[in-house]
Amino acid sequence: MTDLVKEIRKKDKKAITALYNQYGKKLYGYAVSKWNVSEDDAWELVYKTLYKIIEVIDKYTFENESKFNGFIYQIFINNLRNNYNEKKNKYVETIVLEEKHGQYVSEKEETTEEPVSNNPYMNCLKKTLEQFEDWKRVLLLMRAQNFSYDEISKYVNKPSEQLKVYYLRAKQILTDKVNKCVNTI
């Protein structure tokens, strides 16, 4: 082990290849299987890790092989976390809220007119949902988000044992009314 570290410190190409051969496939497999990273991203992270090790190895000493393994693993985990956070933040939309007359309004909501959809199904769905009581609307929407009936019962003040029946009825009514609405268009 110490020979590998000495060779890496010399920036020897054989040592870099040995480092890749010893750890590359293990790190790749871990990223793909445990973190569900795409194959291309996994290889990119492996190479990023190996280059980082080569870059900073002179700053560290290792008592034994397990300490060196931990060092490699920690750098790789940090790269995985950074990759995850970068991907997660790409899909987050930031909305700036401003306080107007005691209510918070986003910049996008400043217009009083609601956008009209060109999709007749969406228009019918919106009209039909507006006809439901608030608690039924909450039930339908939360159930669509896979909330459990126990969680939903906290919001609608109905017994969780009855919510499945209420949900199935409301869903059937919603479906029938939307279909009827669309057929009249």
Image (cartoon, rainbow, N blue to C red):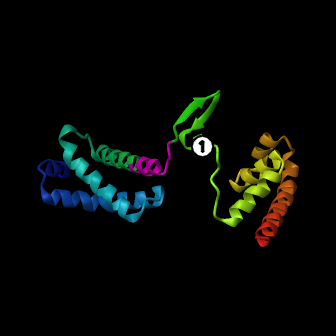
Q: Which residue is mark 1?
A: 111
Residue 36 location in percent, x, y? Answer: 47, 59
Decide whether residue 115 is among the magenta residues: no
Q: Main secondary structure of the magenta part?
A: helix
Relative vertical location of residue 93 with respect to residue 27 in this rendering, above or below:
above
Q: Residue furthest bottom?
A: 183
Left or right? Give the position of 145 relative to 13. Answer: right
Left or right of 166? Residue 124 is: left
Q: Secondary structure at mark 1?
A: loop
Residue drawn at point x = 41 percent, y = 57 percent: 31
Q: Nearer the viewer, residue 2 or 160?
A: 160
- Figure check: 67 above or below 171: above
Quarter of the image for the C terminus: give it.
Answer: bottom right
Q: Tell which residue pokes out farthest to the top in this image.
A: 102
Mark 1, Cα crowd under 10 Å, few <14 / some 14-19 / many 20+, is: few
Residue 9 drawn at (x, y percent): 15, 47
For the image shown, how many numbered marks are present on the structure? Answer: 1
* Residue 100 place in picture, x, y as percent: 60, 30
* Among the 4 quarters of the image, the one containing residue 59: top left
Considering depth in this image, is 148 or 15 the residue closer to the camera? 148
Q: Is residue 59 left or right of residue 46?
A: left
- Residue 57: give x, y in percent of width and height: 21, 44
Residue drawn 85% across the image and 61% down it: 173
- Over which residues does the magenta segment extend? 83-94
Residue occupying the point 31% across, 48% down:
72
Q: 178 or 81, which is in the foreground? A: 178
Q: Is residue 83 left or right of residue 177?
A: left
Identify which amino acid the numbered label 1 is placed on: Thr
**Would you say residue 89 sits in the magenta stretch?**
yes
Residue found at x 43% / y 52%: 87
